[in-house]
Amino acid sequence: MNVADSEVVASILKNSGFTTTEEIKDAGLILINTCSIRDNAEQRIWGRLREIGHLKKKNRDLKIGIIGCMAERLKEKLLETEQLVDIVVGPDAYRELPGLVAEAEGGHKVVNVLLSHEETYADISPVRMDKNGVSSFVSIMRGCNNMCAYCVVPYVRGAERSRDHESIIREVNELFSNGYREVTLLGQNVDSYLWKEGGHDTGFPELLERVASVDPLLRVRFSTSHPKDISDELLHTIARHENICRHIHLPAQSGSSRILELMNREYSREWYMDRVNAIKRIIPGCAISTDMIAGFCTETDDDHKESLSLMEWAGYDFAYMFKYSERPGTKAARKYKDDVPEEVKAERLTEMIALQNRLSSRSKKHDVGKIFEVLIEGSSKRSPDNLSGRTSQNKVVVFPGKGHQKGDYVIVRIERCTSATLLGDII
């Protein structure tokens, strides 16, 4: 999400005469795009501000801005206690940045964190910040209507609104024409995408089908699906198109129905398992990844064991796992006591990580001997003689590849694997 937002910001500033630099010491304006979903993300921003403080001392004309979710949530603290910060701009006010920068250059501290019910930046062609020129993000919606008890997103990004589907198709066509061979459609909950126009409702399955139909050589990914909304219609759409990637990120957060109810996730353990079964039935060979939270309010040892057993049952290919961190303003912060000791959270997270490492290793070992189509993203980080790319299941593959270049599709047989990577040869 933040990468996509940064590309929108870069486009807005470029259209107002700004240029980018690879050297931070040469910058006259530094914008730090922020996330407030977890406390450790915010702590990294405070550390980053301290790191760049010396640049402000050397260049008194340098302007520093905080943009994104943390800007909306901590606007007063950023301006009042962090003398380094000149500009604070929330995720719906990026169009105002050129004027706000000009105001800051006049010696003023400036802030705009107003949320919008309409802003989707649909008319802005993002400046692509990626380096490989093969894969890119396309934002299809903003905000979120799911009021998960632990989550700050609805408060800092506002209500859900979908982007005009025609503008999405135009952007995807432009990316493909410029050599990109993979797009990832982004939304807090892509399953609830809905564009209403002329008496016709375009939902996410139809949008996904239209994007996949741009060209068979264009791979299509999406993130993130919500377990309460992912439909058989969507799964059948994926199954019909080989270029829609066989990977679904389906955050569970917990394996305990009691905890899921406290989290306001609007599904039970049984519902989640039904959706996983549907994925495996309708899209054989589809990889599934997840998010898990350790130590949510009132979580017991039995609740934690249910999370571990769900992970084992699902056999996730990959997972993002975190200790619960209370976010001010959320329902959990207002209504529940953060009563699981930090050392217990840490122990439970360690168990989750150890289990997922075993599951990920098992998943990769099962791929040895199989054949996959791989989209080349560039050279391997460890050896310029090898190439690196991803399978449809979003697994990294490294292989010798003389005569091929990034953006090419190749057929690779997997010969062996490491804990993180599949290793193979082109056939």
Image (cartoon, helix red, strand yellow):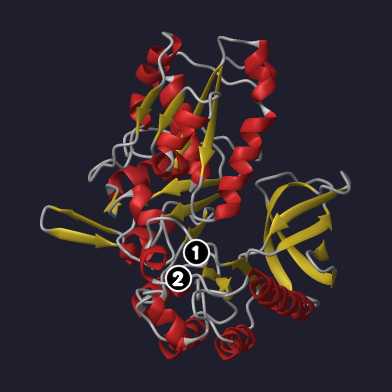
- Which disc number belongs to residue 16? none
Q: Which residue is depicted at the point 38% across and 22% down?
A: 110
Q: Is residue 25 above or below residue 158?
A: above
Amino acid type, label 1: Ile
The spot of residue 396 in percent (x, y) is: 72, 60
**Residue in view at x 56 percent, y 71 percent:** 293
Residue 36 relative to residue 57: left or right: left
The quadrant where residue 374 appears: bottom right
- Mark 2 or 1 closer to N-term? 2
Q: Is residue 398 left or right of residue 406?
A: right
Q: Looking at numbered disc 2 in the image, what kind of residue is underneath it? A: Ile
SS label for mark 2: helix
Kindly identify which residue carries mark 1.
Answer: 244
Q: Which residue is mark 2?
A: 238
Labels 2 & 1 near each other (Cβ < 8 A): yes
Q: Give the side of residue 413 with respect to residue 30, left or right.
A: right
- Residue 41 location, x and y as percent? 58, 49
Other residues around mark 1 within 10 Å, as few (<14) / some (14–19) / many (≥20)? many
